[in-house]
Amino acid sequence: MITAPYMRWAKTRPRVTYDLAASGLQPVTTEDLLGDTTAKDAFDLSGPNDEGYPPLREAIAARYGVTPASVSIGGGASGANFLACLALLEAGDDALIETPGYDPLFAAARAAGATVVPFTRSWDRGFALDPDVVRAALTPRTKLIVLSNAHNPSGSVASGDALEQIGVMAQAIGARVLVDEVYAEAQYRNDPPPRAAARLGPVFVSTNSLTKAYGLAGLRCGWVVAEPGISQRIRNARDIVDGSGAFVAERLALTAFERLDALRARARDILSGNLAMLRDMAVSHQRLEWLEPEAGTTAFPRVRGVDDTAAFVDRLIVEHDTIVVPGRFFQAPSHIRISFGGRREMVAEALRRLDRALSSV
């Protein structure tokens, strides 16, 4: 049976007061999202969305500088990634996937019948995307190269040059490059959004959602941007997964697209302040080896002197009513993933408790 151990843990883990495990942004309220939109406009219960609500696809296309034919809708970024894997892989193919990495990406490739071949983003290089490492991992059966940008769990951002080199490799062997960009727009400074990989050429496929950077996890709105032929294959795959999405959610997602700049500013304010608190704690703690994230809502420090942080996390839960993610779920057991997208007061107290727990290791 194909499983995603991290997601199973995330859904069944103990609930605590001080949560540094949930990787989404502090949720947006209905008032934040709807503003002056009338309830009637926002909550029509049905409408045209057999292949995604057309105005939503148009809004996504406009943001990426593509036509709506290049846009497919999925159930969050995870749903978008799953549909992309179904469309791009089949039994006998190899999928190169980054490690440390998000294990639902591994599970999606396996569900499509592919064999997963890992390639390493190493701590020693700041988890940077290294084209030479990808090249060394290529096999004669490679049909898909899968990575996240910003990197989940570390927040490392790939350079455009590295992505372009990997695109050239993929094109030479008839493969595609799937880039999960769900954390790309969760930024700490007032910089323009990074250029989506799908804009680099038809060999690239970008996925994203409104969940992580925008605090709208409840909408489960994800999307895939790819060349039109691949996009149609993705929509065909959705025919056998869930048919179509929820119209109400897609209508509300369109409302969010009309407010993305304000939502990005909100995220920037939350994340920049919380990251500053996390940085202050982490760089001064003798137990943590700190690597600064460049984007996203998570950091992935290494805990000195601990080979597997699972037992530490269990004690953190029981003794401090606080939680982080054990690194084993990202194939790096000596690490912990710390999420910092929550309410400022909660994050501050959670970090104080984490600091005390680390001091007792």
Image: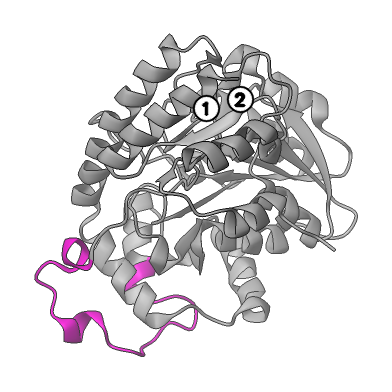
The answer, for residue 54, to whether it is visible in the render is no
**What residue did someone put label 1 on?**
158
Which amino acid type corresponds to the residue marked 1 in the rendered image? Answer: Ala
**Crowdedness of circle 2 by 10 Å Cα count: few (<14), some, many (20+)?**
many
Q: In this view, does 315 lie to the left or right of 215?
A: right
- Percent x, y of residue 16: 47, 50
Q: Which mark is residue 105?
A: none
Give above or below for 226 relative to 244. above
The residue segment tinted magenta is 30-57
Q: Do the residues labelled 1 and 2 touch (CB within 8 Å)?
A: yes
**What residue did someone put label 2 on?**
129
Secondary structure state at the residue bearing disc 1: loop
- 51 drawn magenta: yes
Q: Is residue 305 left or right of residue 275?
A: right
- Percent x, y of residue 305: 68, 14
Q: Is residue 29 left or right of residue 175?
A: left
